[in-house]
Image: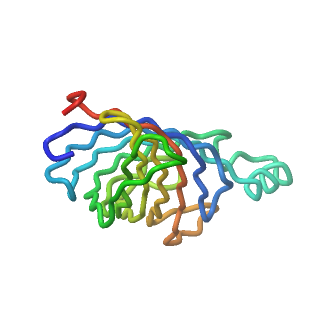
Amino acid sequence: KAGRHELSVMGGVYSADLLSSSYYLSGAYTFHVTEELGLEAAFGYSRADSELVRIIEEDRGITLLREDAPVYLYQAHLLWSLAYGKMRWFGSSISRFDFYLALGGGVTDNQTARGLTGSAGLGWKFFVGEWFAVRIDVRDHVLQQEVLGESALVNNLVATLGMSVFLPFGF
């Protein structure tokens, strides 16, 4: 992977402490500095929704949170492959895998939060050939969020499944 570029597309679940869970769509670019270290820039999109806020709005006849308000996440991570190896499935060809940690931060931009976001997580990439991989990521986003006038430090969890293409092909 050293010196290669990785383009990823992912989808999954965004589970927010103060809001309801929602879908999550993401794209990422990673430059692999060495076999073990990569620098990732990522963009994510979700929507803000809260069943509690909706109940209060209906009861009082007011609007507190725009329905389906967009949530944008802009992040950068250092990826460290702490374990990697090869496996063979029932006599087929040998495939590689990476198990990695992600540490970084960025900005969450939506109605309830506009500020710095710390992020940590882990992931697994299963390589299919030299230039394609399937990836699974779980990340914890820590940020200050405000809903109904209450501000809290929250842990919003994101779980994604995606695919990656490595450039140049056949490196």
Seen in the image, is 90 located left or right of residue 171? right
Q: Which of the 4 quarters of the picture holds residue 117? A: bottom left
Seen in the image, is 31 located left or right of residue 82? left
Numbered circles on residues, count: 0
Residue that protrudes farthest toward the top in the picture: 169
3 versus 104 height, above or below: above
Residue 119 at what x, y percent from top left? Answer: 38, 62
- Identify which residue is drawn at 36% across, 64% down: 118
Residue that protrudes farthest toward the bottom in the picture: 153
Residue that protrudes farthest toward the front in the picture: 91
- Identify which residue is drawn at 59% across, 40% down: 69
Residue 129 at what x, y percent from top left? Answer: 36, 35
165 versus 120 height, above or below: above
Seen in the image, is 94 located left or right of residue 159? left
63 versus 157 height, above or below: above
Residue 86 at what x, y percent from top left? Answer: 37, 54
Q: How is the image coloured?
A: rainbow
Seen in the image, is 99 located left or right of residue 2? right
Q: Nearer the viewer, residue 36 or 116?
A: 36
- Identify which residue is drawn at 21% across, 59% down: 36
Q: Which of the 4 quarters of the picture holds residue 30? A: top left
The C terminus: image quadrant? top left
- Identify which residue is drawn at 35% across, 64% down: 101
The N terminus: image quadrant? top left
Residue 135 at what x, y percent from top left? Answer: 45, 46
